Image (cartoon, rainbow, N blue to C red):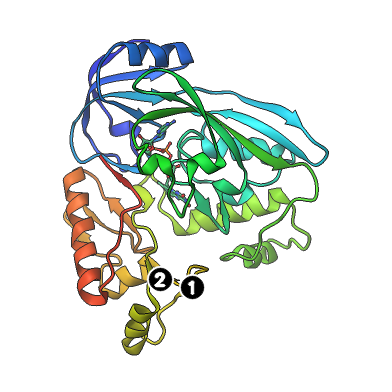
Amino acid sequence: MTIQQNVSLKSFNTFGLDVKAARFAEINSLASLQACIKSGIKPILILGGGSNMLLTGDQQSLVVKNNLTGINVIKSFRNKVWVEAGGGENWHQFVGWAVQNGLGGVENLSLIPGTVGASPIQNIGAYGVELKDVFVRLKAVSLETGKTKTFRRHDCRFGYRDSVFKQEERGKWCITSVVFSLTRHQHRLNTSYGDIQKTLESNGVEKPGIADISRAVIQIRSSKLPDPAKIGNCGSFFKNPETSPAILQAILATHPQAPHYPLQNGQVKIPAGWLIEQCGWKGKRVGNTGCYEKQALVLVNYGGATGQEVKNLAYAIIESVHQKFGIELEPEVNLL
Ligand SMILES: Cc1cc2nc3c(=O)[nH]c(=O)nc-3n(C[C@H](O)[C@H](O)[C@H](O)COP(=O)(O)OP(=O)(O)OC[C@H]3O[C@@H](n4cnc5c(N)ncnc54)[C@H](O)[C@@H]3O)c2cc1C
């Protein structure tokens, strides 16, 4: 393990922001992670695929790129297997491995960028499925002491794009592996969300399997979201806000068509993309940044943007949504 100095992170973050890490190391083993911790250089920033971070400037921390790989079946039950995957495994390739091996549970999460190790951080979710639905446990190494700890589901306190690792345990751990519970047969297929059913029908699929669902999700996502290899972005920049029925009523009075979804806790969820679009941001360009033309929730780097520019745009959007609707948007992306 070598610690390099002044390394550009441009190719390590999907916004394509050209910032530097004062110190940078890639880890391929637990021993090299321990060596980074023992180096005493603090703080340490763990980097996965860089697909959920806005690097607002040069990083003074020791940036550690997680390349811990390996996918192993560790337990077999009649209809389930437990699979342990290294934190540095590419998430979409892990999903592909599961689908190829006939294992169900993660097919709706196809084509989400990033790593297995980052998947519990914000309890990734898409098309009606969340990471917590298949999660068993994870192993993490303390960036303070170097000791390993196992976190079970209740320790992680998963919420909507949230976990303990975005709250009080933020920045304290390197997640080295995650164990998933996947089905062998009798998969619980989830085709009711978004355009999945419609896409299956147009693909001529009457009795879908997990591979058909994965293919449909890939098709839908490719048509709606910008490919970070072509245009820098981090997917949804903001969370969909939860608000009170009273605020919703006020919005419906002027916007009767406002989309909204009741939640079990009595609150309602309003799509952030709709709120942003109503404020006139969809497709709008500000310097080198802007709101993606097909989805207002996605902020993009048209090339040469700085992290500060993207952050300024995000705050201008938060401000205008607050002024118009009285709702405070919260970034889903980690600002660093
Ligand atoms: C086009 C696009 C579409 C997207 N669609 C979705 C979607 O549908 N659903 C969804 O939930 N997300 C989505 N995302 C966001 C992103 O892909 C996920 O949040 C993903 O899990 C981030 O993984 P990463 O490895 O890139 O994390 P990074 O961006 O590298 O890191 C994110 C945060 O986690 C920390 N971290 C990373 N790895 C570890 C580790 N091993 N241990 C401890 N801390 C760690 C980092 O320090 C940072 O704070 C999308 C992003 C893009 C670009």
Residue that badge 1 annotates: 261
Give the residue drawn at x 50%, y 39%.
155
Amino acid type of the residue tagged 1 in the rendering: Tyr
Quarter assignment of residue 313: bottom left
Quarter assignment of residue 321: bottom left
Q: CA distance from mark 2 to mark 1?
A: 7 Å
x and y percentages locating residue 271 in the rendered image: 41, 68
Q: Secondary structure at mark 1?
A: strand
Q: Earlier in the sequence, mark 2 or mark 1?
A: 1
x and y percentages locating residue 279 in the rendered image: 25, 73
Asked if residue 328 can be seen in this view, the reply is yes
Query: For this rendering, which residue is in front, 202 or 209?
Result: 209
Question: On the picture, is 11 further left or further right than 48?
Answer: left
Q: Quadrant of ligand 1?
A: top left
Query: For this rendering, which residue is in front, 157 or 284?
Result: 157
Considering the image in quadrants, where does the C terminus appear?
top left
x and y percentages locating residue 270 in the rendered image: 40, 71
Give the residue drawn at x 24%, y 64%.
284
Quarter assignment of residue 299: bottom left
Residue that badge 2 annotates: 270
x and y percentages locating residue 36 in the rendered image: 34, 15
